[in-house]
Image (cartoon, rainbow, N blue to C red):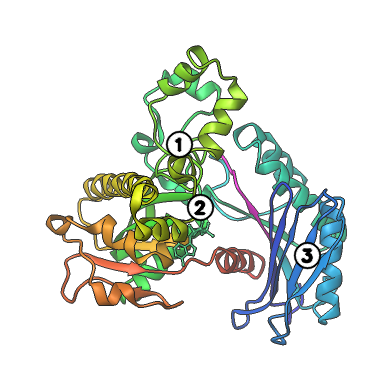
């Protein structure tokens, strides 16, 4: 790395997608961002936004066979803006990796041994880690000399005490199969809990925060003095809150019942719980905007949307209560991600009736729309309630840069 190398390319590889951002860590500026979708299909699409120049988004459609071709296309777009992957200003590539198991507690420079370890974790994240590995291999082939860093979605949660991380399962069986609660969205929980402390003018070590990451996937975490002590997702992202398409917490016996009584296969149950449950299963929509629109329109359809909303809110309240008990003292509740940042009715409903816990929302403050972190609790509240936009790419870039510039 040269002294002028301050740029980090952040890659988030999905099974058929590649999201990226190029950031300059000298000043945190975002130079470019984009997304390749439907990799492997005839109708692949690359949308590239040259943020450095303020230019319009450039869209290209047409077959992109695999991740290698996708990254080459991204590299060509970046090169067209004078930001190519061969630039001496590029310090590193930071990869989002979903599952880091117990061993990866920190961002890690990727070498062959690290890649082998990430591969060993594939049984724990069979959908996500293979895509992340493909992204890493592709980027290493294009720039073998450049440091590549893995930033794990599970890492922030590795501080959970054993009594929070362990299921009440037979210990030998659990250990033999690495079954425990790992938690996900860790990059977001880390970033948002730190930003919440900053909003309060405090050091993270001084505050206890409940973070509600409410996107299409959703998770809650209890963060005590900057360290995660509990989180709602478990062995997989299925556990916990009601999500866009995932059920969240459910009696595990429902799965036996579906197999024995409804005659469903393993894969069908998996698909039901991960893709066809949660808000979409309850009312046919997983977009909170549409759910609110239907509630406002009323009628029978509105009532169905209202029930889905109420189930979603009820689960949130249960986690707020549980994490208040886990933390003992709560200084702040932070809402983040698509729903948390944008859906004022969700924030108001989740905290309604929790005055005894010191939690309340000021209606006027809650109605403000902004991209900035902000407080929405009434003046003088015991618990600060905040909306803190998450920024996983910035967090990955910062962690990557801190590691390679140390
Ligand atoms: P994420 O996974 O963080 O990108 O969040 C995506 C979800 O955020 C969508 O499925 C919507 O439910 C929700 N969302 C996005 N924008 C809004 C909005 N303006 N109002 C309510 N919900 C929103």
Residue at figure coordinates x 61%, y 38% from the top left = 125
Beta carbon at label 2 within 8 Å of ligand 1? yes
Q: Nearer the viewer, mark 2 or mark 1?
A: 2
Q: Magenta stretch?
A: 94-101
Q: Residue at x 63, y 64 (%)?
A: 400
Residue that label 2 marks: 216
In the image: residue 188, left or right of residue 268: left
Cα distance in 3D space between marks 1 and 3: 36 Å
Q: Which residue is mark 3?
A: 46
Q: Position of residue 360 (x, y in %)?
A: 20, 64
The quadrant holding residue 129 is top right
Q: Does 257 appear in magenta? A: no
Residue 297 is situated, as x and y percent measured from the top left of the image, at 37, 59
Residue with the mark numbered 1: 181
In this view, which residue lies farthest toward the top?
Answer: 260
| Numbered circles on residues, count | 3
| Residue 84 appears anywhere in the view | no
**Does residue 140 sit above or below 180 in this rendering?**
below
In the picture, measured across the screen, residue 363 lies left or right of residue 227, that is left
Q: CA distance from mark 2 to mark 3?
A: 22 Å
Pick whichever of labels 2 and 3 is earlier in the sequence.
3
Question: Relative to 223, is 182 above or below?
Answer: above
Q: Secondary structure at mark 1?
A: loop
The crowding category of the residue bearing disc 3, from other C-alpha atoms within 10 Å (few below 14, some 14 to 19, many at least 20), is: many
* Residue 181 as seen in the image, left or right of residue 144: left
Dot 3: element: strand
Callout 2: helix, strand or loop? loop
């Amino acid at each position: 790395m040269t002294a002028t190398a301050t740029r980090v390319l952040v890659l988030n590889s999905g099974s058929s997608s590649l999201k990226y951002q190029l950031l300059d860590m000298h000043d945190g500026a975002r130079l470019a961002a984009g997304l390749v979708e439907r990799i492997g299909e005839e109708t692949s699409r690359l949308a590239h936004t040259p943020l450095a120049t303020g230019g319009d988004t450039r869209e290209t459609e047409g077959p992109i066979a695999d991740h290698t071709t996708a990254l080459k296309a991204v590299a060509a777009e970046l090169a067209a803006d004078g930001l190519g992957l061969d630039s001496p200003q590029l310090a590193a590539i930071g990869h989002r990796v979903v599952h880091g198991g117990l061993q990866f507690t920190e961002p890690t420079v990727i070498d062959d041994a690290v890649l082998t370890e990430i591969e060993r974790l594939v049984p724990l994240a069979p959908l996500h880690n293979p895509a992340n590995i493909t992204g890493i291999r592709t980027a290493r082939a294009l720039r073998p000399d450049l440091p590549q860093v893995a930033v794990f979605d599970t890492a922030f949660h590795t501080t959970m005490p054993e009594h929070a991380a362990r299921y009440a399962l037979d210990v030998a069986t659990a250990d033999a199969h690495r079954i425990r609660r790992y938690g996900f969205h860790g990059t977001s929980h880390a970033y948002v809990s730190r930003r919440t402390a900053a909003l309060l003018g405090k050091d993270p070590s001084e505050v206890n925060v409940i973070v509600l990451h409410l996107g299409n996937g959703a998770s809650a975490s209890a963060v005590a003095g900057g360290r995660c002590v509990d989180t709602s997702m478990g062995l997989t992202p299925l556990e916990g809150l009601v999500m866009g398409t995932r059920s969240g917490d459910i009696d595990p016996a429902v799965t036996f019942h579906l197999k024995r009584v409804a005659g469903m296969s393993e894969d069908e149950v998996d698909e039901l719980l991960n893709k066809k449950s949660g808000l979409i299963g309850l009312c046919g929509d997983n977009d909170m905007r549409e759910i609110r629109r239907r509630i406002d329109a009323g009628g029978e359809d509105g009532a169905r949307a209202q029930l889905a909303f109420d189930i979603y809110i009820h689960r949130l309240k249960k986690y707020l209560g549980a994490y208040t008990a886990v933390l003992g003292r709560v200084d702040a509740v932070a809402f983040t991600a698509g729903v948390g940042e944008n859906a004022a009715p969700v924030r108001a409903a989740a905290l309604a009736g929790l005055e005894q816990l010191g939690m309340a929302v000021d209606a006027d403050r809650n109605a403000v729309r902004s991209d900035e972190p902000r407080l929405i609790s009434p003046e003088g509240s015991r618990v600060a309630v905040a909306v803190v936009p998450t920024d996983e790419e910035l967090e990955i870039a910062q962690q990557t840069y801190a590691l390679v510039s140390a």
